[in-house]
């Protein structure tokens, strides 16, 4: 039987390589001769060295594995923190939730529940996402809407809001009856960034899954891993150990007694077992965590020690046994060659017999060498694109989680020289695409941006050693200049911007607005500088052609705080013209409205914000008329589309074509001209007599019709009935008086045709607040 096995092994070995036979036999004979004496020496040396060398290697390997897995755990916790901060600053969780009646606004409750469900499903470690709103009647979305009737439960949640930290980790007991059952929880006050929060978003972690996450930091599936907050307020264990257990207490004492400059890995003896311990720190929000991983290595070293003893004993046995061991050793010596051969040749062990394994390995290595060169060439070609992507992420602020040192290392990796340098951000915005002199028209924004970016990049390369340009495909581009930190580049930057403006005027026939940031010395300050120049460009006046805005000089000289002009009269007239289907008047009033916004040296942002405000009122009127804006505009986000347009002429065209025209077309299909004229007369009568005792009968008598037809026509044309329109008109007049006058509330009520007590009730019902509170907020 043994002979058959050896024969089978020999034939398979010959099949692997045609040159193995003679070479292998000679080496085997030599091994038989030398294996007897060196075996004894080798066994002794192995037995002597195994105790120290193996443990050292295991400790180093344990340290490397734990550090890698700790980074993975740190990334998971960081992602949770970033996600919660993103949602806490979302407008959905702003001050509008404070005191909101969710029973009346059930749609808001449903939207909040959907958002919490999405957050809860975004990470497998999340057990539950909750929104707590404090107040006289505290509410808890978990994630469904619910009211808290237990003072003990509301007191627990109020403690989370009363902390000075707006975002923090804690280990909290949410059940007053079971204070010993605590859960790892991430808390963020809402609204985000508020000094007086009224609620909190909570992510309650699944204790079992947190333990499973910590178990990934134990490479041998045995031992103990735990996280502890340096202040001692939080503790999480992979093995469900208590923070005061003897083993955990011993580890923490050992770590605390170690010197700060000592290595973060060491051996720890406990109850006859040796543990490889690695520890480190996580930088969490406003605090530091320490992670500790302890794995027993005795179970690993014991088998090796036993094998070394067996080698030592076997080396003293007979020569026949030494020969057998030599034969086994020769096979093992050949196994790396076999594995290398199989790896390089993709398990293809069939050879022709003329070439041995080393020849085939050499040929395959040459092929891999040339493939490596080819990959290096492709990498060099893709490096500029990767560099541009990094710059775009840096400018947009997507790399805020990286430290200053990490950002500098990444920039140096992309061949930037950042030592003793300052960074200047230039934001270029092109206008005048509708000008008669322009070569381009609407729809060519991407082409214009690409052409302008090329011009900007070429001019920058001629003047500065380090410059990078990125275009945003919307008639804007950004330039990052890396200049010496001695301030010598200031005049050169201004000269470059002036040349840039002249060149684009000549080549593209476009007007240019250039905003220059103040020099910053930190890479992490670049996103803030970029955001600053973008905002500065939005404050450009319409009077000049080319404009160069120097942020450093602007900060020194101050800014103009003139209030923008917003014509409420033109807004009402425009909305009335749209309601009655008067297209020409609507277009004329829209043009007059934009001209009014541009008056008094208005900035671009004033015009854009005014038109966004008008768009909101128009969409409100459309909804009141019974038309669904989402259906009318085919699901387009009108606010986002309007915010992308920067020129008043383009805004006027867009508003006519995209907002007014679809509504008038829909309205014309629903109402006849006679009915619209009658309703217009009724609206004029109500606007002139709203302060008097007006009724449906008196209005019908005034315009010469019957009450039934008038009521039906009101509903058909305006989308709501007579009394609702009269109430809305009176409320609008009342809000104007509350905003623009110092009349008492009772006087305001009389001027809009209401008794004082009834006016307070109906105003609070419709606006959600009392008239006094409305006046306070508007001021």
Image (cartoon, rainbow, N blue to C red):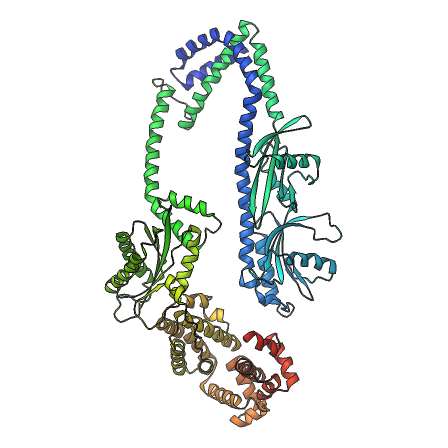
Total marks in image: 0
Is residue 338 visible to us here?
A: yes
Residue 540 image offset from top left, x and y in percent: 37, 68
Q: Residue furthest left?
A: 506
Q: Quadrant of the N terminus?
A: top right
Residue 436 image offset from top left, x and y in percent: 26, 71
Is residue 3 visible to us here?
A: no
Query: Residue 627 vs residue 16: left or right?
Result: right
State the image quarter where residue 259 is shown: top right
Query: Residue 302 vs residue 242: left or right?
Result: left
Q: From what the image shows, is residue 170 above or below residue 58?
A: below
**Which residue occupies the foreground of this view, 322 or 258?**
258
Residue 519 image offset from top left, x and y in percent: 38, 56
In the image, what residue occupies the spot 50% across and 82% down? 717
State the image quarter where residue 470 is shown: bottom left
**Which residue occupies the foreground of this view, 218 or 192?**
192
Q: From what the image shows, is residue 413 above or below residue 177?
A: above
Q: From what the image shows, is residue 214 above or below residue 197?
A: above
**Which residue occupies the foreground of this view, 674 or 33?**
33
Q: Residue furthest front?
A: 486
In the image, what residue occupies the spot 69% across and 48% down? 182
Q: Residue furthest right?
A: 177
Residue 63 image offset from top left, x and y in percent: 54, 33
Q: Quadrant of the C terminus?
A: bottom right
């Amino acid at each position: 039987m043994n002979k058959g096995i050896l024969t089978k092994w020999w034939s398979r070995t010959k099949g692997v390589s045609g040159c193995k036979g003679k070479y292998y036999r000679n080496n085997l004979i030599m091994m038989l001769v030398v294996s007897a004496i060196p075996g004894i020496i080798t066994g002794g040396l192995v037995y002597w060295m195994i105790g120290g060398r193996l443990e050292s290697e295991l400790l180093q390997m344990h340290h490397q594995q734990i550090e890698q897995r700790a980074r993975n755990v740190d990334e998971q916790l960081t992602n949770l923190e970033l996600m919660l901060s993103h949602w806490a600053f979302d407008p959905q969780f702003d001050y509008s939730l404070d005191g909101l009646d969710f029973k009346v606004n059930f749609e808001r409750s449903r939207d909040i529940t959907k958002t919490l469900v999405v957050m809860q499903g975004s990470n497998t470690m999340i057990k539950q996402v909750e929104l707590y709103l404090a107040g006289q009647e505290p509410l808890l979305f978990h994630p469904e809407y619910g009211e808290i009737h237990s003072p003990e439960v509301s007191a627990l949640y109020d403690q989370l809001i009363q902390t000075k930290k707006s975002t923090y980790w804690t280990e909290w007991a949410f059940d007053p009856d079971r204070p010993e059952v605590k859960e790892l929880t991430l808390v963020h006050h809402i609204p985000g960034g508020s000094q007086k929060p009224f609620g909190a978003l909570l992510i309650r972690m699944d204790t079992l899954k947190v333990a499973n996450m910590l178990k990934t930091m134990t490479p041998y599936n045995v031992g103990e891993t735990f996280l502890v907050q340096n202040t001692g307020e939080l503790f999480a264990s992979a093995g469900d150990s208590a923070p005061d257990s003897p083993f955990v207490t011993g580890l923490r004492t050992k770590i605390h007694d170690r010197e700060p400059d000592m290595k973060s890995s060491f051996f720890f003896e406990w109850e006859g077992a040796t543990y490889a311990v690695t520890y480190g720190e996580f930088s969490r929000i406003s605090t530091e965590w320490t992670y500790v991983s302890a794995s027993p290595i005795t179970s690993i070293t014991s088998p090796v020690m036993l094998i070394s003893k067996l080698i030592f004993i076997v080396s003293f046995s007979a020569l026949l046994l030494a020969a057998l061991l030599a034969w086994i050793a020769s096979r093992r010596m050949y196994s790396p060659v076999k594995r290398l051969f199989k790896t390089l040749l993709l398990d293809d062990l069939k050879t022709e017999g003329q070439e041995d394994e080393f020849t085939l390995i050499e040929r395959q290595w040459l092929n891999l060498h040339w493939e490596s060169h080819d990959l290096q060439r492709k990498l060099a070609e893709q490096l500029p694109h990767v560099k541009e992507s990094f710059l775009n992420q840096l400018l947009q602020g997507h790399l805020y989680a990286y430290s200053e040192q990490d950002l500098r290392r990444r920039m140096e990796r992309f061949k930037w020289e950042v030592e003793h340098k300052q960074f200047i951000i230039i934001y270029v915005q092109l206008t005048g695409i509708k000008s008669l002199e322009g070569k381009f028209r609407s729809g060519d924004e991407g082409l214009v941006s690409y052409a302008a970016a090329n011009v900007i990049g070429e001019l920058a390369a001629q003047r500065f050693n380090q410059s990078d340009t990125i275009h945003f495909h919307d008639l804007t581009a950004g330039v990052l200049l890396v200049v010496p930190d001695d301030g010598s580049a200031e005049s050169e930057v201004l000269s470059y911007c002036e040349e840039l403006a002249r060149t684009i005027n000549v080549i593209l026939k476009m007007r240019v607005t250039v905003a220059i940031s103040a020099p910053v010395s930190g890479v992490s300050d670049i996103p803030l500088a970029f955001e600053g120049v973008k905002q500065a460009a939005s404050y450009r006046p319409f009077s000049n052609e080319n404009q160069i805005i120097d942020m450093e000089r602007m900060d020194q000289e101050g800014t103009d705080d003139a209030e923008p002009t917003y014509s409420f009269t033109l807004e009402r007239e425009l909305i009335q013209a749209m309601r009655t289907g008067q297209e020409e008047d609507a277009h004329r009033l829209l043009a007059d409205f934009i001209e009014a916004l541009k008056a008094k040296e208005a900035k671009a942002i004033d015009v854009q914000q005014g038109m966004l405000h008008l768009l909101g009122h128009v969409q409100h009127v459309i909804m009141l008329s019974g038309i669904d804006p989402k259906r009318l505009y085919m699901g387009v986000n009108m606010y986002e589309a309007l915010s992308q347009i920067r020129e008043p002429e383009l805004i006027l065209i867009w508003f006519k074509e995209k907002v007014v025209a679809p509504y008038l077309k829909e309205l014309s299909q629903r109402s006849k001209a006679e009915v619209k004229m009658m309703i217009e007369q009724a609206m004029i009568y109500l606007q002139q007599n709203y302060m008097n005792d007006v009724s449906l009968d008196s209005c019908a008598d005034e315009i010469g019709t019957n009450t039934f037809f008038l009521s039906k026509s009101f509903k058909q044309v305006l989308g709501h009935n007579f009394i609702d329109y009269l109430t809305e008109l009176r409320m609008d007049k009342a809000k104007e008086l509350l905003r623009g006058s110092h009349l008492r509330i009772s006087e305001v009520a009389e001027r809009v045709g209401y008794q004082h007590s009834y006016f307070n009730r109906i105003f609070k019902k419709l606006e959600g607040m009392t008239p006094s509170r409305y006046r306070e907020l508007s001021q």
